[in-house]
Structures are given as C-alpha cells and as structure tokens.
C-alpha cells in the first residue's frame, strides 16, 4: 500500500469521525466499520468474509508469511472505563487472501507506551496446489489493555496506522 493510499484512508476516516461529532451523531449512527463492537457475521455487504483464526492441524506442514491487508479501521470504545483507567480499542483489518487455500494463522501484539506492534500471519499448506482466486476478508482484533487519551502509532506488519484517543467530556 503506498503513502497516498494510506493518507487517503486516514483522511477519510478522520472526516467521517469529524462529521459525526459535528452533526451530533451517536456512536451507533456511525458507519458500521467505525463502530466499536459492531460485527458482520459471514459475508458483509462489501463482499468480505469475517475471519476467525483457527488452530492449524498439527499433522500438516504449513508455509507462513505476513498477512496482506489493505484497510485498517481503529475503533475506540465510546466511553472510558468506569474507574477512569482508559478506553478499550479494537481494530478492523480488511484484506484479501491470494488463493483458495490461504488462511489467517496467528496474531501477536506488543505495546510500548503509545507504540503498538501487531504481527498478523497467514498460512498455506506446503506442497498443495491452490486455485488462484482473490478472497476478501475482514478480521476484528481487540487490542490488549486500555488506552488513555493521546496519540498512538499502530504498526501492522510493515504498515503504520496512527490514531488518536480523545478525552471524554463528563
């Protein structure tokens, strides 16, 4: 994904959130992809299948590689936690598998203050011929921990996705 595409996606997300806040929209009136906790089961209107990571079969040998993704929506919860410790954040990752055999394999998260690194891996069975067909997917990832207001940097594999947690007016 090039810098222009990333900028466009971030700008589009920022505009949607700005318009929603200016228009006084409630969080449930935001587009579904911008709502914390909203899930599409099965296939969404955009044709992407919702994916859940399943354990690999132990007797099969796999090839592992970084997951391909094209869109990331960072979705903070609406309100801070009751004790004021921060906000939950989830990420909607959209991408596409390159063939009929590839599937998501694993996700690892690391956090150092306001920098988050997520490693999302795919797998394909070694030595198997697969039909070349693009299979769009969506994957929902709840980030570990709570997030206080501030600027954050989320890196998924080799792409960066900055986001902001806003303070909640009480």
Image (tube, helix red, strand yellow):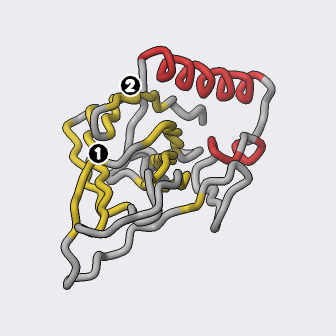
Q: Residue under label 1, please give it.
A: 118
User: Alpha-carbon neighbours of circle 1 within 10 Å: few (<14), some, or many (≥20)?
Assistant: some
Q: Is residue 4 above or below residue 53?
A: above
Of 97 and 87, which appears nearest the observer?
A: 97
Of 101 and 65, which appears nearest the observer?
A: 101
Q: Position of residue 64 (x, y in %)?
A: 23, 57
Distance between the alpha carbons at the discs numbered 1 and 2: 17 Å
Image quadrant in which you'd find residue 23: top right
Residue 139 in sight here: yes
Residue 151, which numbered label? 2
Q: Position of residue 12 (x, y in %)?
A: 62, 23
Image quadrant in which you'd find residue 87: top left
Q: Quadrant of the C terminus?
A: top right
Residue in the image at 68% along x and 57% along y: 44
Q: Is residue 45 above or below residue 106?
A: above
Q: Quick one: which residue is furthest to the bottom in this view?
A: 59
Residue in the image at 51% along x and 30% along y: 167
Left or right of residue 1: residue 109: left
Q: Secondary structure at mark 1?
A: strand
Q: Position of residue 156 (x, y in %)?
A: 33, 39
Residue in the image at 55% along x and 34% along y: 168
Residue in the image at 65% along x and 28% along y: 17
Closest to the camera, between mark 1 and mark 2, is: 1
């Amino acid at each position: 994904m090039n810098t222009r595409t990333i900028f466009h996606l971030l700008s589009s997300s920022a505009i949607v959130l700005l318009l929603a806040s200016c228009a006084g929209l409630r969080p449930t009136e935001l587009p579904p992809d911008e709502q914390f906790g909203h899930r599409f089961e099965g296939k969404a209107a955009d044709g992407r299948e919702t994916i859940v990571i399943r354990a690999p079969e132990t007797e099969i040998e796999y090839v592992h590689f970084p997951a391909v993704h094209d869109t990331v929506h960072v979705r903070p919860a609406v309100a801070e936690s009751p004790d004021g410790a921060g906000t939950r954040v989830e990420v909607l990752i959209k991408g596409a598998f390159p063939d009929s055999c590839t599937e998501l394999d694993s996700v690892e998260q690391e956090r150092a203050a306001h920098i988050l690194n997520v490693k999302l891996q795919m797998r394909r069975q070694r030595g198997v011929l697969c039909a070349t067909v693009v299979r769009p997917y969506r994957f929902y990832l709840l980030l570990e921990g709570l997030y206080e207001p501030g600027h954050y940097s989320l890196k998924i594999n080799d792409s960066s996705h900055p986001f902001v947690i806003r303070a909640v007016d009480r």
